[in-house]
Amino acid sequence: MARTLIRGGLVVTAAEETHADVLVDGERVAAIAAPDVAEAWVPGADRVIDATGMYVIPGGVDAHTHMEMPFGGTVASDTFETGTRAAAFGGTTTIVDFAIQQVGGTLRAGLDAWHAKAEGNCAVDYAFHMILADVNDAVLKEMDQLVGEGVTSFKMFMAYPGVLYSDDGRILRAMQQAADNGALPMMHAENGIAIDVLIEQALAAGRTDPRVHGEVRKALLEAEATHRAIQLARVAGSPLYVVHVSAAEAVAELTAARDLGLNVFGETCPQYLFLSTDDLARPGFEGAKYVCSTPLRPVEHQAALWRGLRSDDLSVVSTDHCPFCFAGQKDLGRDDFSKIPNGLPGVENRMDLLHQAVVDGHISRRRWIELACATPARMFGLHPRKGTIAPGADADLVVYDPAAQQTVSAATHHMNVDYSAYEGRQLTGRARTVLSRGTVVVDDGQYTGRAGHGAYLKRDTCQYLV
Ligand SMILES: [Zn+2]
């Protein structure tokens, strides 16, 4: 087994910041030791990585991605190969993607289809959530089987009537099943029935440009759905994880639920922290680059999101990475905002944007790691393999240069999409060397990994439930 020693860095986890050396043996972390003790390991190491002046952090865990996802007549532009390679460049070494049940189809068929897309193609490790698009008796039974196979979280949509939408009865039944089998229900919380009325009215009034997407998907309709999802989970006795929270009013619903001691968790994404309706309102058709759901909000909402991240009313930052090219895909909605494919690229940018939040004083360094690595790993049953640096954990490690300066640009990013949502933004900090299970996959801007290195991860159930 190859031994790698990472020397001289500041090891940062959700729990500790320690000047220590990390010994990797094969695919796992073997030991962490004070530098004078680790000196004795140098002769036995096959490779020594100098991390002087660097942080040594766990590889990022992005619990919300959509590689090659079909949406609105097109398909998200990153494949599992390009998307996971871009993730690696950005210091993310685990993704949890969403397999989708077809309406009228089985969960098994949906899961098999996503395994086929991912297998042999990933640069870093991957796991799956399952999207429930058609809850019925057979599907409820299948949920139990999937939990046994390491698919332990099931997402439903209160949005997108006629496509992925589940009504309250179906949601309640799936939540009851989850209460029994230990799974974690995930919710896209927006009142899609009401939103569709507002979309129709806006289009009838001739309002077709991208900014209207943000206006019809009202914060109150996110808050209302969040509230309803929480009450349904209470009735079912299940936990609840609300994805991509963007509105201050929705954070308030989560805060109220958590103040009651409920197993209710919230996720937000970098786009809601760093972008706003000002971007959706960019002139021409430029705003289409920023169309995603939940939508970007007026800039005032950001303060509530940052506060939620500090108070743990929001516990995870994932990307909802779902890229569509500006030319040829976002274009589909040039005359009708409701036809713009929903989604933003971001899997490569998340760790750096959150490090910038550390630099800017929004969150602490350890909270950065907690939000981006440790909590998503525990939330989705990947701890202790992922999300921390500890003896026995997978050697998913990032040597992170906290002083590196970078300018984000589509010209230099590795995602398979023709624009960056953060074009021109100056960031401090960048992943220098990235290891996935002991293998260096990115080194100083060079890709040294390979498609197929990434392995499928069977997950345990959520580790936060009380
Ligand atoms: Zn999503």
Image (tube, rainbow, N blue to C red):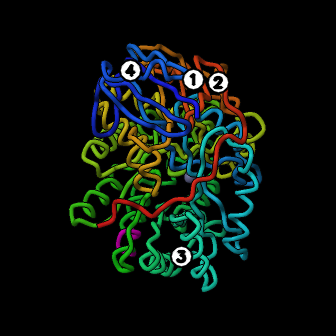
Quarter of the rendering containing residue 221:
bottom left
Q: What is the C-alpha distance between the residues marked 1 and 2?
A: 7 Å
Which element carries disc 3, helix, strand or loop? loop
Q: Give the position of the C terminus as an image quadrant.
A: bottom left
In this rendering, the answer to whether 391 lies above or below 193 is: above
Q: What is the C-alpha distance between the residues marked 1 and 3?
A: 39 Å
Q: Residues within 10 Å of mark 2 (few under 14, many from 20)?
A: some
The residue that mark 3 highlights is 167
Question: Residue 131 in magenta?
Answer: no
Q: Give the position of the N terminus as an image quadrant.
A: top right
For the residues bearing labels 4 and 2, Cβ distance under 8 angstroms? no
Which amino acid, mark 4? Ala
The residue that mark 4 highlights is 40
Q: What residue is rendered at 39% in x and 79% in y? A: 236
Percent from the top left, x then y, of residue 255? 26, 57
For the residues bearing labels 1 and 2, Cβ distance under 8 angstroms? yes
The residue that mark 1 highlights is 423
Q: Does label 4 or label 1 sit earlier along the sequence? A: 4
Q: Does label 1 or label 3 sit earlier along the sequence? A: 3
Look at the numbered disc 4 and say if its residue's Cβ is closer than 8 Å to ligand 1: no
For the residues bearing labels 4 and 3, Cβ distance under 8 angstroms? no
In this rendering, the answer to whether 19 lies above or below 287 is: above
Q: Does label 1 or label 2 sit earlier along the sequence? A: 2
Which element carries disc 1, helix, strand or loop? loop
Which element carries disc 2, helix, strand or loop? loop
> In this rendering, does residue 426 appear at all?
no
Instruction: Give, as a single range, the part of the protein colored magenta.
Output: 228-232
Which amino acid, mark 2? Ala
For the residues bearing labels 3 and 2, Cβ distance under 8 angstroms? no
Q: In the image, which is nearer the foreground, mark 4 or mark 1? A: 4
Q: In the image, which is nearer the foreground, mark 4 or mark 2? A: 4
The residue that mark 2 highlights is 410
